[in-house]
Structure formats: C-alpha cells, structure tokens
Amino acid sequence: MLKYLPDILSGVVVTIELALLIVVTGIAAGLALALLRSLGIRPLNWLIIGIVDLFRSLPPLVVIVLIYFGLPSVDLSPSG
C-alpha cells in the first residue's frame, strides 16, 4: 500500500486543482452570462436562457462525454 501512496497523493492534488479550476470557471461564466442578460437584449436573453436550461437538464456525465468527444472537432485534443 505504501508504494502507491505517492500516486494517490498526486491524484488528490490533481483533483483539488481541477475542482478549483472548475469553480473559478463556473463563477466567471455565470457572471459573464448574468452581465449579458442585464443588457436587456431580448434575443440574447432567450439564447442564454435556452443554453442554461439545456445544461441544467442534462446529466453531468452526458455533458462530460459531449465535451470530451466534441473537443477534437475544434482541433483541441484532450490528453489522458
């Protein structure tokens, strides 16, 4: 068990880093969308509401799969 401890600790660090990155990204995206909605442009508001409702209705695993398999279509290759 002790020989796996460095790998486990490395995984814990990566998990914490990813969690912090996701929280910061989520706050920034939410703030940006809220500011865009406050402009009062009706078509833009409907678009934002539609996108938010779509992501709220999808299970998180489906969103992860869509992002993972969608990234190569925009020339971004996920490593791992």
Image (spheres, rainbow, N blue to C red):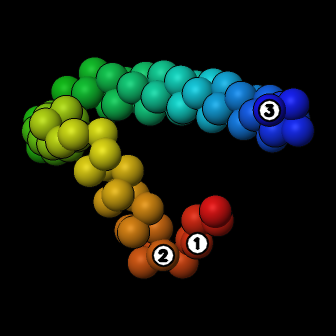
Task: Report whether 28 appears left or right of 38.
Answer: right
Q: Residues within 10 Å of mark 2 (few under 14, many from 20)?
A: few
Do the residues under discs 1 and 2 have CB atoms within 8 angstroms? Answer: yes
Instruction: Tell me the quarter of the image containing the C terminus.
Output: bottom right
Say whether marks 3 and 2 touch (CB < 8 Å). Answer: no
| Number of the front mark, 3 or 1 | 3
Which one is earlier in the sequence, the residue at label 3 or at label 2?
3
Measure the alpha-carbon separation of dots 1 and 2: 5 Å
> Which residue lies under the disc numbered 1?
77
Q: Give the mark nearer the N terminus: 3 vs 1.
A: 3
What secondary structure is found at the residue carrying circle 1?
Answer: loop
Quarter of the image where the N terminus is located: top right
The circle on residue 1 is 3
Q: Which residue is mark 2?
A: 72
Image spot of residue 76 (x, y percent): 56, 71
Tell which of 34 and 74 is nearer to you. Answer: 74
